[in-house]
Amino acid sequence: MKRLLMILLAASCFACGDGEGEENECNGGGSGNTLEGSYCEDVSMVFTEVGCLTVSDALRIEYVRPIGTGSEKTLQIILSGANVIFEANKEIKLKESGAEVRRILADAAAPIRLTDELEGQSSLTFGTYTSTIGQPMDGEFAMLFKSGRNLRGTFECTLKDALPQQ
């Protein structure tokens, strides 16, 4: 009976992998890149990788899934360095800092803005952060929506320039 339960649990978590290029859908713990929470109950939150990109004074954290010749941003958090100082172990309130939270889906005409749906206590904290391109960074976030739903996540990525020099 115990063995059958383990097999069923493993089979029900077909999208919970953390391998490179493997799809993840609100996978909870296990890897350094996770999404979980009640927001996932009826919203598809599939991603294969997490990117951390900088352009000018902005930082983008993106949960990405390749689609055909393009990609989908299952979740994108954009923070402006003009509004907040990026540093490790300092909580950043997403609404107060003017962060933009959105989804960019392949079949949507425009980005889906989630910022206005967030409650004030929604936040992000870097565990490791340097402003140096090519260096690793990680952190976590917790979002509470006005609907009462929540979305939590962790991320581990290498900081890249969104507009690399040619």
Image (spheres, rainbow, N blue to C red):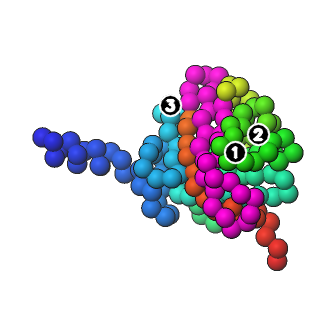
The image quadrant of residue 143 is: top right
Please say whether residue 83 is one of the residues in the magenta stretch: no
Query: Which quarter shows the C terminus?
Result: bottom right
Which disc number belongs to residue 99? 2
The image quadrant of residue 96 is: top right
40 relative position to 78: left or right? left
Please say whether residue 140 is one of the residues in the magenta stretch: yes
* Callout 2 crowding tier (Cα within 10 Å): few <14, some 14–19, many ≥20: many
Question: Mark 3 and mark 1: span between their CA atoms?
Answer: 19 Å
Which residue is painted at 29% across and 49% down in the image?
A: 10
Q: Are marks 3 and 1 in contact (CB under 8 Å)?
A: no
* Mark 3 or mark 1: whose residue is earlier in sequence: 3
Which residue is painted at 82% across and 48% down in the image?
A: 81
- Three-letter amino acid code at disc 1? Ile
Which residue is painted at 67% across and 64% down in the image?
A: 135
- Three-letter amino acid code at disc 2? Ala
Can you identify the residue that label 1 sits on? 77
Which disc number belongs to residue 38? 3
Question: Mark 3 and mark 2: span between their CA atoms?
Answer: 22 Å
113 relative position to 20: left or right? right
Q: Give the range drawn in magenta.
A: 122-150
User: What residue occupies the far front of the structure in this picture?
Assistant: 89
